[in-house]
Image: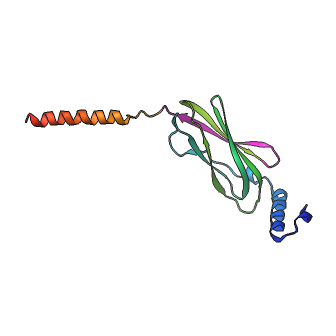
């Protein structure tokens, strides 16, 4: 396998990939992942951003998030880990918008060999949209308040 790499940089990459697959002693399983944090209160009109931790020195592909009823599942895909230094780094998943309601948010870890490991589960509450006034409504409200203030001041 490494014979096909004959240039300096390619040899380093080949050796690194070989070490990753050989030394990939389930480091991802050894670490405990804390629950995700949501960067803002999820509403039904916004995308939800979930931040979660993953083992350091792992080579990750894209994550994939699927919604099945009231279950929202993010699967993080690993291409292998180097068990040199323990620790965690931060990843993010962006999904939604979701209808208002209570969901279960799960994080799974897909290992380089294709096996999937459940990592965490928590409740996710999506709020209805926060009502806001249109610019025209704000203008009408300000005009009405100004007229009331002028009427009160002119009668004094």
Quadrant for residue 130, please give it: top left
Q: Quadrant of residue 104?
A: top right
Left or right side of 137 for 76 = right
Q: Residue furthest left?
A: 156
Which residue is at the far front? Answer: 136
- Residue numbers of the magenta segment: 111-128
- Is 126 drawn above or below residue 19 in the view shown? above
In this view, the residue farthest toward the bottom is 8
Q: Position of residue 3 (x, y in %)?
A: 92, 65
Q: Magenta segment: does it hold 122?
A: yes
Question: Relative to the observer, which residue lies in front, 68 or 36?
Answer: 68
User: Residue at 69% of width from left, 45% of height from top?
Assistant: 63
**Quick check: is 25 in the magenta stretch?**
no
| Helix, strand or loop: magenta stretch | strand
- Residue 33 position in % (x across, y down): 66, 48
Q: Residue at x 82, y 66 (%)?
A: 10
């Amino acid at each position: 396998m490494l014979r096909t790499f004959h240039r300096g940089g390619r040899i380093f990459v080949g050796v690194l990939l070989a070490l990753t697959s050989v030394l990939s002693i389930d480091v991802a399983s050894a670490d405990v992942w804390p629950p995700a944090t949501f960067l803002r209160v999820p509403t039904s009109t916004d995308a939800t951003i979930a931040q979660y931790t993953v083992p350091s020195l792992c080579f990750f592909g894209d994550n994939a998030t699927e919604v099945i009823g009231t279950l929202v599942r993010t699967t993080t895909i690993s291409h292998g880990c180097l068990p040199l230094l323990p620790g965690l780094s931060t990843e993010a998943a962006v999904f939604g918008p979701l209808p208002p309601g209570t969901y279960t948010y799960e994080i799974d870890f897909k290992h380089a060999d294709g096996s999937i490991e459940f990592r965490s589960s928590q409740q996710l509450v999506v709020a209805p949209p926060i009502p806001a006034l249109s610019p025209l409504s704000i203008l009408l409200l300000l005009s009405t308040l100004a007229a009331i203030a002028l009427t009160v001041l002119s009668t004094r």
